[in-house]
Image (cartoon, rainbow, N blue to C red):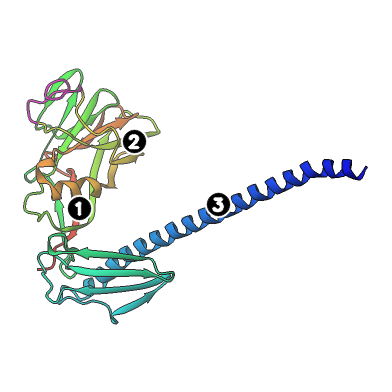
Amino acid sequence: MKRQRGLVLLPMTLALALVAVVAYGMTRDGAMNVSAVDAQFDTERARYLAEAGVNLVKWRNQQLGCGSALGFTRAVTDVEGGTIMANTADVFARKRGLSMTLTATTARGAVNNVVIDDAHAVQVYDFSKKTEVTVAGQSGSDTYIRSDAATSSNAKFLEVTDGKAHGLVKFGLNGIDKNVLLGHADLMLYQTDSKSTQPVSLGIHRLARDFGLLTTWYMGWTTPGGDYDQEAAATIPITGNGQYTTDVANLVGGWIANPPANYGMLLKPHGLTEAHFSSFEASSNPPRLFLRYYPLCK
């Protein structure tokens, strides 16, 4: 009987031993995986610390109002999660930005180095020289196109009708340095009349092709009605006649940085019927852009 019990217990013992081996392996693998994840997390923390250090150097120099280059108050600066050591260039190349060598070290020892040379210098802006300007029809152009009519140039309004008429507006931005920091770019439009019922809205889309006096709904485009970004840069809820303002800094910033890309914007209605907005030729309330920007340190 004892021999039989021993024979019965042997497979059970082997099975338990096998389970123990597997459990040990799983625990060891799990620990190794946790360690790997933890190491990766620490590496990422070092990278974020380095990026924070670059921004901190930029911020400290920005407070100087375009003075000489300034590093940290100490060679090594303690921050949450580690330390940052940065050495800025001895001479601040104001027209080119701020160069630096930066080392971020986490509390656990992960290191991330950042070297920013003159060719990739961090730009610093002069916030003491704020420029505000309102741009209207100067050096610009506007018109509207209808699917059932020729282009109407020099009209005192821009007509928009859902699926039938689009407004086209281009602001001249010549004379603005492409390296400025754009703070605000507000588009102002004025609706004079409409046959619409609520709810309606007006989408502002970036044009992908230039337009001219000969442009129609079908001519001058690869797609009838205009070539434009399908995603609106801004959408304005329309609740009646009056002035509407919306932020279009994402459009204007790109045009200032790259003037040849300024093809203007397309006004695409949603639910609007024969809505009229004042054009550049209107006697009052033409389309306008309010811009606020800051120059680079010089």
Q: Residue at x 91, y 45 (%)?
A: 2
Residue 185 position within the rendered picture, expressed as x and y whole percent measured from the top left = 22, 52
Residue lying at the far top of the rendered structure? 148
Q: Which residue is mark 1?
A: 290
Left or right: where 114 falls relative to 107? left
Residue most extreme to the bottom: 74
Secondary structure beneath disc 1? strand
List x then y, in percent, for residue 98: 17, 68
How many residues crowd mark 3 within 10 Å: few (<14), some (14–19), many (20+)? few
Query: Where is mark 3, residue-wise?
Result: 29
Q: Are marks 2 and 3 in contact (CB under 8 Å)?
A: no
Determine the secondary structure under disc 3.
Answer: helix
Helix, strand or loop for the magenta stretch, by majority: loop
In this rendering, the answer to whether 143 lies above or below 13 is above
- Identified by mark 1, the residue type is Phe
Q: CA distance from mark 3 to mark 1?
A: 61 Å
Question: Which amino acid type is shown beneath numbered disc 2?
Answer: Ser
Q: Quadrant of the N terminus?
A: top right
The residue nearer to you, when weighing 213 against 182, is 182
Q: Earlier in the sequence, mark 2 or mark 1?
A: 2
> What amino acid type is highlighted by mark number 3?
Asp
The answer to whether residue 48 is left or right of residue 179 is right
Magenta-colored span: 212-224
Instruction: Name the residue beneath numbered marker 2.
Output: 201
- Residue at horizontal 12%, vertical 27%? 152
Closer to the N terminus: mark 3 or mark 1?
A: 3
